[in-house]
Amino acid sequence: MTDLESALRAAVRGEVGFDVTSRALMTMDASNYRRVPLGVVAPRDADDVAAVLAVCRERGVPVVPRGGGTSIAGQATGTGVVLDFTRHMNRLVALDPESRTAVVQPGLVLDRLQDAAAPYGLRFGPDPSTHSRCTLGGMIGNNSCGSHSVAWGTTADSVRALDVITARGRRLRLGQDWAGAPDGLRDLVAGDLARLRTGFPELPRRISGYALDALLPEKGADVARAFCGSEGTLGVLTEAVVRLVAAPRARALAVLGYADEGAAAEAAAGLLLHHPLTVEGMAADLVPSAAALPRGEAWLFVETGGDTEAEARARAETVVRAADVVDALVVTDPAGQRALWRIREDASGTATRMPDGSEAWPGWEDCAVPPPRLGAYLRDFRRLLTDHGLRGTPYGHFGDGCIHVRIDFDLLTDKGVARFRRFSEELADLVVAHGGSLSGEHGDGQARAELLPRMYGAELVSLFERAKGVWDPDDLLNPGMLVRPAPLDTNLRFSALPREPVDVAFGYPGDGGDFSAAVRRCVGVAKCRTTSVAGSAVMCPSFRATGEEAHSTRGRARLLHEMLAGEVVTDGWRSEEVREALDLCLSCKGCRSDCPVGVDMATYKAEFLHHHYAGRRRPAAHYVMGRLPVWLRAVARTRTAAVVNALAAVGPLAWAAKRLGGIAPERRLPRVAGETFTRWWGRRPTPAGTGPKVVLWPDTFTEHLSPEVGRAAVRVLEAAGLSLVLPPTLHTSSPTFAPLTARRGRVCCGLTYVSTGQLDRARTVMRRTLDLMAPVLATDLPVVVLEPSCAAALRTDLPELLRDDPRAAALSSRVLTFAEALQRLAPDWTPPRVNRPAAGQTHCHQHAVLGDMADRRLREAAGLDGELTGGCCGLAGNFGFEAGHFEVSRACAEEQLLPAVREATAGTVILADGYSCRTQLEQLAGVRGRHLAEVLAEGLEA
């Protein structure tokens, strides 16, 4: 391997990675399969690709081209050298609106092409649900389709010419009339015309096998089209000329409700007469909440287009009238359509969990049958599932007869794997009996290639093998795919994982307490790899800042998987590779809500740090910022805030303190409040509140760093009629809790300890807090928490770390945000009308854990107009203050927050409920962000 690595480094200008991290990141795609590569190369251009092929050919090392790594069938994994095109060969080379064509490199993400084409009223027709991260090269390799294939076909229908390098180094330009055909291909076809004319089923979604019928004379002998769907086994794509289509000026979305999926499937083919853009189907099992959908247990999403909104709506209403539905909804508002489409697109991740939370897996993800046969096929499919004791929820492209489904295969035991094989063989026969294709979108890979003889027969499969030999006589490119395949029940990704649960600190309630199962949640659909964030979404800010797979949620999950497997990452919890990948995780928890399967990397990071540093010295920042509550209480106790602030303002002293404390030198040290919130509370006149009593939580940030937020919240909550008390600090049976004093024993959510992985200390702090809160928990009083990150810690980290203590769940259930408290406890109160535009950012923990609907309603009632941005501010508690994180922290802020603030008009209120968000705004933009409580308190005064 050393010789291979040295030869590649000498031959190519792109990056060559044979290190643990590079290899671990590429062991899997979005399939059930896992292969460990020797190394990874990110070529800069076609010359680099040719050089890699030459080096590997000389040594007999396989080469695997890879795009976004979202392949479902295993074809983006391999044991040789993986070519990663996403890093450099990711450009849109040219776009010609007149000819409606674009020249693209293989690593270009589809959404980037769509963004470039949109100003000309154009788009690329195929659009898989992974459009925000899949690449054009991967789409060509799989002949991808997407929801609009009923209107615009597959990727092969959109390809005009392909630049390809063969395994033996020939550079070919593929096109029609045998353009670019390698020697021997034409003779191969001429010798078997009859079989090519009769051996392929006629249906819109036939992706399985090689498309050799595209080489027939009557089909234009289109070598480029025949190359599509070859899964990197024939040549390496370096550039493509693709066709664009005119995008409708307006669209309408008709959502049709049916009694069950069978009724929806039966209806789909008939709707094609109305020339829709899409006919997509899904059932209730895949919908977290059907509140936004019309009545029914299954739905068809039928999109129509037109030159005007009225025309598009009229066509959608025609579809509704033609459909025999339980209920229907027609939406023309673009935002409303996007929200509905997100429900459908997230099914690819949602389907990886059964309704009861158990795991489900791909393997038979995309079979396709003629659309008129879909209803009958689904009935037989359901019967086959029942016969094998399996469960799955079909969804997908009903208008094309293509069904996606994840099935609750047991791929962890020998008995379960044997059932997986038996089911696969019987389902293949069922698909063929209905005149279908084993693959209708994602390709064959390892999942289905073994069964191709059942679909095509031995003679046609033999022809596929001969075609592979013409293109790649040395079997160098992606061997084991499509022809001479590996068995479908080998190389399973789960076989390397430990069979016994790993000893961990968190409870992982959604995974039965099994950390391996939590890590298995990441199936690789890679929603975390999006290069721009839409709406209020957050995940994954560090990937968008760095563009590196290791700093995506998926990349980190891959490394944790390999850490548990122990083959590539061999030093377990002590792994420096895993630590480095997790180092840039902001613990924003965006993945907890935005990932379709709920991967919670913030929790995994805390777990890892807990084990990684067990019995060892930690980074200085963990002691300084992880134990921030201790230091701030010491300052308050000694009343030295003024001294601390004065010393922090002295440049050399601040520099030395930051260096010793592991704090980024670019950061200014925050000022400590001269008077804590609870000290202010203790000297204020006691109000005679007569309304509902609530406990106001004095979190560390409100208490010591921004007590003005606490004072404002008190003003507003009391104006709303609520009666406030603070938590006790000592055990007491008194119904009026002991006042807070400067003594030990203050309540604390443990957030700073959790975020730095000091979980033993976090549990100690949390247990002490529960002891102190005993008098509160003996009542039914709610607890209002002003700092979103602290509220999120109490809602999630507390019960997951103290899973055996019922008090933790009790306190968690009491937690309300500021806006939730007003909405639930003072529903008749009318806030002051501020009547000003608002900008800023929804706190990432609020988005991911708490929800912000109450905040939206409160802002609307107060006349605060404008949407807050998504993403993450980038400071994220201790993250942005730690040395080495400043540039990533600033990049995250520059993504949405800072541009929104700069673009805000005069008089705009900059809202930021989180202390970190306000600090980031102050330090990077010179702007003071306001907690919503401050704005409303100011309105009351006015």
Image (cartoon, rainbow, N blue to C red):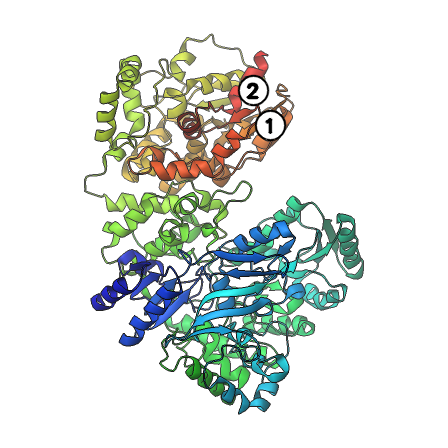
The amino acid pointed to by label 1 is Leu
The amino acid pointed to by label 2 is Leu
The residue singled out by tag 1 in the image is: 858
Q: Quadrant of the C terminus?
A: top right
**Can residue 314 be seen?**
yes
Does label 2 or label 1 sit earlier along the sequence?
1
Question: In terms of depth relative to the viewer, which is nearer, 21 or 40?
Answer: 40
The residue singled out by tag 2 in the image is: 936
Q: Say what secondary structure mark 1 lies in.
A: helix
Which quarter of the picture shows residue 662?
Answer: top left
Please provide percent x and percent y for residue 317.
78, 54
**Which residue is depicted at the point 60% across and 27% down?**
858
Q: Say what secondary structure mark 2 lies in.
A: helix
Question: In terms of depth relative to the viewer, which is nearer, 550 or 111?
Answer: 111
Question: In terms of depth relative to the viewer, which is nearer, 361 or 697?
Answer: 361
* 375 vs 306: above or below: below
